[in-house]
Amino acid sequence: MITTTDLRKVYRSRGREVTALDGVDLRVREGEVYGVVGRSGAGKSTLIRCVNLLERPTSGTVTVDGQDITRLAGRDLRRARTRIGMVFQHFNLLTSRTVRANVELPLEILGLAGRERTRKALDLLDLVGLADKANAYPAQLSGGQKQRVGIARALAGDPKVLLSDEATSALDPETTRSILALLRDLNRRLGLTVLLITHEMDVVKAVCDSAALMKGGRVTESGTVAELLATPGSELARELFPVGGDASTPDSTVVDVTFLGETAAQPVISQLARTYNVDVSILGAAMDTVAGKQVGRMRIELPGRFEENVVPIGFLRERGLQVEVAGEEQAAPVVEAVR
């Protein structure tokens, strides 16, 4: 549904150049919720603004629903943008207009007649759970309610794609959860493809099917959340499920284990301890539900050096777990041991 190819954006000011996007390739499939994660300055917001050409890229292409929108301008571009809704971090509501009138604004621009505008605006407000706030003004709403108005307004043009630029970063945790639940519900009910920008890993865990990590204007990792969690050395997986803990002695082996789906409910660690009569210490653990599947990561300590634990580590791999041994010099022999 959304594809960017070798996307570059360079800002020029007073003889200096700042590269915000440096060859970004991204592919968002139809009907999925896709999260782009990264720290401030990574290029996330520039990327999402290039997707609907609020920022025109310096080079590269952006394809939305099969149409290369980087080739469009004027009326053709405005028409294409009506199929791409956008939700902003700070709501961007007009304080002098009622909630209903804010939602009607894009419908006015589209030329809908007054009665039809009102009917559609009320339907959209009902969809986001604000039917009773149609005649209120933004100053009378909470932050979460303002964002729901922003979402209703973004849906006014019946878009196929919804872009969300840090839409929950100004909200408290409980309100954030309600807005994410709304986005997921709209994704399923309307068949929307959602591309969201965030710096919060909990957002990815709560709502995303796929994700990408950005650093310095580049995408350094991307894929479905399940694929990323199963990828050895994935930085995104470590950020999603951070587990810590150091070895108690220099003669022990520290192993990071990732549980996906059915393996998360199996007593694999206790089976390991019984099968090999080994004392397993749990240094850290995290468990959550991601994309409807139970996922967990655990850091364990095995007595003895790596060479003494090749067989127990192979046992974990044979049970379908993703296993990483602390220390790059040890990771490669593990793969050989279970081939």
Image: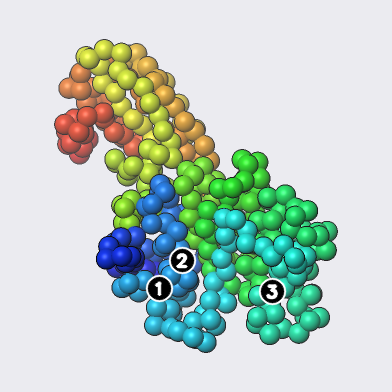
Q: Quadrant of residue 338?
A: top left
Which of 304/183 is in front? 183
Mark 3 secondary-structure assignment: helix
Q: Identify residue type, mark 2.
A: Arg
Q: Identify residue type, mark 3.
A: Leu
Residue annotated with mark 3: 105
Seen at 42% across and 49% down, the residue is 40
Residue annotated with mark 2: 49
Q: CA distance from mark 3 to mark 1?
A: 24 Å
Seen at 58% across and 72% down, the residue is 159
For disc 3, the neighbor class at 10 Å (few under 14, some 14 to 19, many from 20) is some
Q: Is residue 239 above or below residue 15?
A: above
Residue annotated with mark 1: 56
Mark 2 secondary-structure assignment: helix
Mark sitting earlier along the chain (2/1): 2
Q: Identify residue type, mark 1.
A: Arg
Q: CA distance from mark 2 to mark 1?
A: 8 Å
Q: Quadrant of residue 7?
A: bottom left
Q: Is disc 2 in contact with disc 1, using a CB cutoff of under 8 Å? A: no
Mark 1 secondary-structure assignment: loop
Mark sitting earlier along the chain (3/1): 1
Image coordinates for residue 328, horizontal then vertical, percent? 20, 33
Which of 61/232 is in front? 61
Q: Is disc 3 in contact with disc 1, using a CB cutoff of under 8 Å? A: no
| Left or right: 40, with 143 as reference point | left
Residue found at the far front of this picture: 14
Seen at 79% across and 75% down, the residue is 118
